[in-house]
Amino acid sequence: MRLFRGSGRQPPPATVLRILDEVDHLLVESLDGQVMELGWTRDNRLAFQPDNYMLLVLKKTAWHSFIHPLRIGALVADGKDEDLGRFDQFRFLLGLVFQIIDDVLNLNGESTSYGKEMDGDLWNGKRSLILSHGLSQVTAALLH
């Protein structure tokens, strides 16, 4: 927002309000996703399905890094754009792919190129698609 305000370009007040609504929604979804993930970790929730993971990615990653930045960019380009959601599903899928790759790199990447703590997600109990699949395989093996 600081960069936007400092750009010198002042959109009409109605556009500014729409941008603020987008930022507000971005913050609510991101915080909700963070709370969801921390709650699952705190409660040691092991019954974790791919749908749960996709909801988490939508809230924590996709809205923040893929959906809202492009929606806000569309408003900056044309404040009268009435169909900001026309690409949301595609942007969600981009966020999902990004998050899955990040999860895999956290377990199997090179620490010099990954730039984050290796295996940190696993040690911190973060729920990933990989963990969900592993738990389902262990559970199935125990039941047979």
Image (cartoon, rainbow, N blue to C red):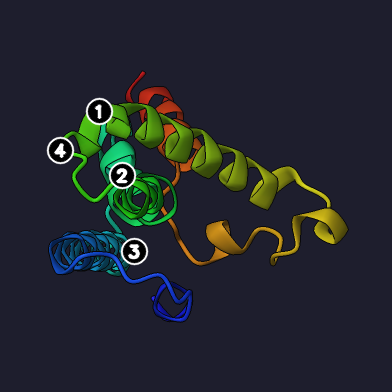
Compare marks 2 and 3 and give the one earlier in the sequence. Answer: 3
| Other residues around mark 1 within 10 Å, as few (<14) / some (14–19) / many (≥20) | few
Label 1 to label 3: alpha-carbon separation: 34 Å
Please tell me in which quadrant of the rendered image residue 144 appears. Answer: top left
Q: Identify the amino acid type marked 4.
A: Glu
Checking the image for residue 120, the label placed there is none
Closer to the camera in the image, 97 or 123? 97
Compare marks 3 and 4 and give the one earlier in the sequence. Answer: 3
Residue 136 position (above or below residue 115)? above
Q: In the structure shown, which secondary structural element does the residue marked by tag 4 occupy?
A: loop
Which residue is label 2 attached to? Answer: 58
| Other residues around mark 2 within 10 Å, as few (<14) / some (14–19) / many (≥20) | many
Checking the image for residue 41, the label placed there is 3
Q: In the structure shown, which secondary structural element does the residue marked by tag 1 occupy?
A: helix
Q: Identify the amino acid type marked 1.
A: Arg
Which residue is label 1 attached to? Answer: 86
Which residue is label 4 attached to? Answer: 82
Cβ–Cβ below 8 Å for labels 1 and 2? no
Compare marks 2 and 4 and give the one earlier in the sequence. Answer: 2
